[in-house]
Image (cartoon, rainbow, N blue to C red):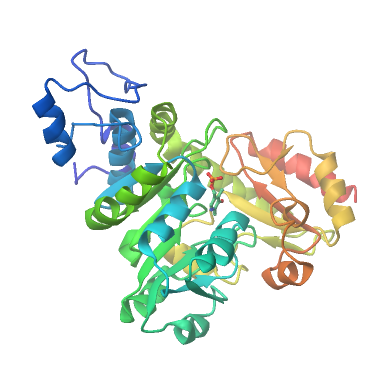
Amino acid sequence: MKTWNKRTKAVHSGIRRSQYGEVSEAIYMTQGFVYNSAEDAEARFIESGPDEFIYARYGNPTVAMFEDRIAALEGTEDAFACASGMAAVNGALTSLLKAGDHVVSARALFGSCLYVLEEVLTRFGVEVTFVDGANLDEWQAAMRPDTKAVFFESVANPTLQVVDITSVSKLAHAVGALVVVDNVFATPVFSNAAENGADVIVYSATKHIDGQGRALGGVVLGTKEFIRGTLEPYMKHTGGSMSPFTAWLLLKGLETMDLRVRAQADSALEIATALQGSNKLEQVIYPGLTNHPHYDLAMAQTGSGGTVLSIDAGSQEAAFKILNALEIITISNNLGDAKSIATHPATTTHQRLPDDQKIALGITPGLIRISVGLEDVSDLINELNGAITAL
Ligand SMILES: *Cc1c(COP(=O)(O)O)cnc(C)c1O
């Protein structure tokens, strides 16, 4: 199995067939499991084997198939499936940290991630230092002997700043800190996060893994020691586990993810290239464009600019005009979906941030984030060109 390439693993890894030999993975929609005897129950609570389950919050065969498949794809020893991306981020950090620990985090974060670091962890006595994720000197200066973890989005939402996983990991490992990476924008298709030094990799499976807007899910990947020794006890007792039905949707999502994500990334590059010259836009931001400040890093780290681009229309008024002129591209706030989606971060996903912080992070009033879907790319380009030239 180790010799299989990612696309083969995405279809076949982790499968557990029942006595009926079904082709498609079975949905084990059960909360509990029956024991043959009282002694059996006792033994299973002391130590459960790989195909012995106790309670769906602890583990379930459909969920285990998803965990094994995504771990095989990512190249980590193990994985734990969570109810949402945020259950995964919160679980990865909270299970690891205790009062008195220090964390260094990139400042440019998804709003809910920022809440966990800024509001939740600090309330329990964890000290957090925020740095500019692209500035290695700031990372270096922030590291301390008591730094237990570093956290960042490998590609930040929605400004598409790319963080150098290899260099930050070296700095973190030098003080003995674990590197926890939110890898949503890189996607499991283009990820080399484990090879680059990340110890713990987190995905919101709601995004590219489902890719069809059906379910919330998340996953934490890492060593067996971290996943089963540190994370699992916390997750299984605090309730953030994944539902078997969600795991089944995501298993089906993984089978087509490579095709979808590559097609979406190809279209994103075509759109970014087509819009780049427009004199009505202040900026087209896409890590796959050679003029992006982190183009070389993005290519070395993932080999792709990803499925999301951002454009700056100059003002909120112009941004709203563009959004309201769109027909195919829907106004919503998911990403990685088969349907193209446009978001105005300043008034929606990042509304909560004070204005000065928005500007510091590059979340300008004219910024529109576009998650590119699976539609015909010429339709998308025509629609965006039409909306932009009408300004
Ligand atoms: C969406 C997202 C999350 C949260 O995932 P949910 O599944 O919505 O809980 C975390 N980090 C990033 C970068 C995201 O885009």
Residue 268 x %, y %: 61, 48
Residue 31 x %, y %: 35, 25
- Identified at 31% across, 47% down, the residue is 79
- Identified at 41% across, 29% down, the residue is 252
- Identified at 62% across, 57% down, the residue is 111
Residue 211, visible in the rendered structure: yes
Residue most toward the left?
A: 39
The answer to whether residue 165 is above or below residue 219 is: below
Residue 172 x %, y %: 37, 76
In the image: residue 292, left or right of residue 137: right
In the image: residue 55, left or right of residue 287: left
Figure quadrant of residue 226: bottom left
Residue most toward the front?
A: 38
Residue 164 x %, y %: 45, 71
Which quarter of the image is occupied by the N terminus? top left
Q: In front: 7, or 81?
A: 81
Q: In front: 79, or 280?
A: 79
